[in-house]
Image: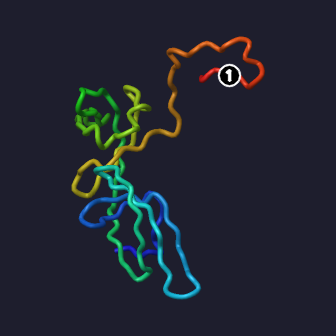
Amino acid sequence: MATTSDIRNGMIIRFKDDLYEIIEFLHVKPGKGHAFVRTKLKNIKTGKVIDNTFRTSEKLEEVRVEKHKKEYLYFDGQFYVFMDSNTYEQMQVPAEIIGDLDKFLVENMEVAMKLDPSGEVVGIELPTTVIQEIVECEPNVKGNSASVSGKKA
């Protein structure tokens, strides 16, 4: 069990029978009354963000998340398929878990897959840089020099 002083961004906790990732937190010590921690929590399964306040005396159940290197193979319309490069075992991940990160997934990219203690996928972590090619870009309009004109890419 973790205390409120152990809270950090990216920490995953079990709260109201669901897994939540702490997006941001703020320790508050008012002039009167007891100190508390104001947090923004993101539900791992639904992606919904909620605000919650914890008293400093509260205990939180921290969920240990393991990271495993996997290689992204393809998207079959419903699931993203990843492969373990050592065992060649393939794993299907529902599209809801990947969320908006799908824009940056490139075939054969190595990602860090986050697994909870039961072996369930709770998310992925992309590399810090991604190399992609710009396929199409609108041309710059000539004669628009009164304002800053630039191409989108």
Residue that sits furthest to the right in the current view? 146
Q: In x, y percent, where is residue 43?
A: 33, 55
Crowding at label 1, few (<14), some or many (≥20) Cα neighbours within 10 Å? Answer: few
Residue type, mark 1 in image: Gly
Picture quarter containing residue 84?
Answer: top left
In the rendered image, which quarter contains the C terminus? top right
Q: Is residue 87 left or right of residue 131?
A: left
Q: Which residue is mark 1?
A: 150
Measured along the vertical axis of the image, is residue 139 above or below residue 81?
A: above
| Residue that appears at 27% across and 67% down | 16
Measured along the vertical axis of the image, is residue 137 above or below residue 116?
A: above
Q: Is residue 25 left or right of residue 31?
A: left
Q: Is residue 147 left or right of residue 49?
A: right
Please tell me which residue lies in front, 20 or 81. 20
In the rendered image, which quarter contains the N terminus? bottom left
SS for dot 1: loop
| Residue that appears at 73% across and 25% down | 148
Please tell me which residue lies in front, 32 or 86. 32
Q: In x, y percent, where is residue 21?
A: 38, 58
Q: In x, y percent, where is residue 10?
A: 44, 57
| Residue that appears at 55% across and 80% down | 29
Q: In x, y percent, where is residue 139?
A: 61, 12
Measured along the vertical axis of the image, is residue 52 above or below residue 70?
A: below
